[in-house]
Amino acid sequence: MILEMIFSASLVIKELLIYFANVYDHTTLKAPHPARSAKLSNVGLTS
């Protein structure tokens, strides 16, 4: 039960992080795009 809650919470957090990263991507040009894309794909690979 607790493990399931932790797992679902981590999924929600990951979704939020990806969402905020995408929003940030669209609102600023400060950071280089390839670096951020690599970071996001790394998150996807480790899950």
Image (cartoon, rainbow, N blue to C red):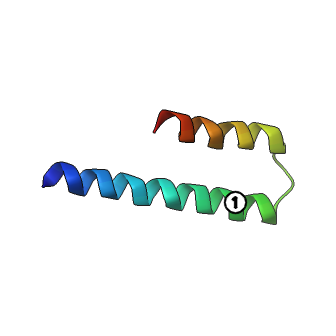
Q: Amino acid at mark 1?
A: Asn
Q: Which of 10/28 is in front?
A: 10
Q: Quadrant of residue 1?
A: bottom left
Percent x, y of residue 6: 26, 52
**Residue 23 in the image: above or below residue 31:** below
Q: Does 32 sit above or below residue 13?
A: above
Q: Residue at x 22, y 53 (%)?
A: 4
Quadrant in the picture for the C terminus: top left
Q: Position of residue 37 (x, y in %)?
A: 73, 43
Residue occupying the point 55% across, 56% down: 17
User: In terms of secondary structure, where does tag 1 sit?
Assistant: helix
Q: Nearer the viewer, residue 27 or 22?
A: 22
Of the pair 36 and 11, the residue shown nearer to us: 11
The residue at 76%/37% (across/down) is 35
- Relative side of 8 to 31, left or right: left
Q: Which residue is mark 1?
A: 22
Q: Please provide percent x and percent y for residue 15.
A: 51, 59
Outermost residue, left side: 1
